[in-house]
Amino acid sequence: MSLVKTTRINFLFDFYQTLLTDKQRLYMNLYYSEDLSLGEISGEYGISRQAVYDNVRRTEAMLEDYELKLNLFSKHQERLKAIESLEQLIQGTDDQSEKMRNLLVGLKDYD
């Protein structure tokens, strides 16, 4: 599995995990965050490797579907890019520039 896909799924999981069942959250956390293999998860929970695989793949598809409908991750990325662009535009040392920089820090912390 590619690092790009793993990173994307981890971000989507962060945004949408509350929409998943307890079992889906558990398997996704073990597989993606704890880096356990399908065999390790299946052995730990007494189910087949195929059942874990199917659950993980279905959950990945659900996360992608949630993103397609809600766009929380995409909007998050857009906000970060906008903040970065604004930071580059604020070059001054006057009070107004300092106030704008403080507002941007607040926006970063909000995320």
Image (cartoon, helix red, strand yellow):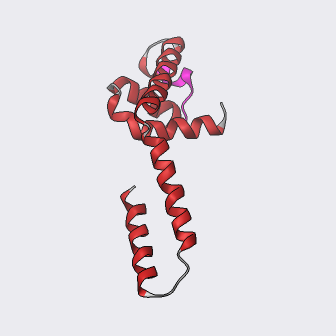
Q: Position of residue 71 (x, y in %)?
A: 44, 37
Q: Main secondary structure of the magenta part?
A: helix
Q: How many marks?
A: 0
Residue 53 shown left or right of residue 105 in the figure:
right
Name the quadrant containing residue 59.
Answer: top left
Q: Is residue 39 magenta?
A: yes
- Residue 104: percent from left, percent from top: 43, 68
Q: Quadrant of the C terminus?
A: bottom left
Q: Residue at x 46, y 26 (%)?
A: 65
Q: Please tell me which residue lies in front, 24 or 19.
A: 19
Residue 23 at x, y = what percent?
A: 36, 23
Q: Name the residue: 47% across, 30% down.
A: 68
Q: Residue at x 55, y 35 (%)?
A: 35
Which residue is rendered at x = 43% and y = 62% of the image? 108
Residue 103 sits above or below residue 73 on the image = below
Along the line of sight, the residue nearer the viewer: 83 or 17? 83
Quadrant for the N terminus, please: top right
Quarter of the figure with residue 22: top left
Answer above or below: position of 89 versus 6. below
Q: Position of residue 13 (x, y in %)?
A: 44, 36
Residue 17 quadrant = top left
Above or below 99: residue 61: above
Magenta residues (range): 35-43
Q: Is residue 34 visible?
A: no
**Considering depth in this image, is 44 or 79 the residue closer to the camera?**
79
Q: Is residue 54 visible?
A: yes
Return the residue found at the far bottom.
Answer: 94
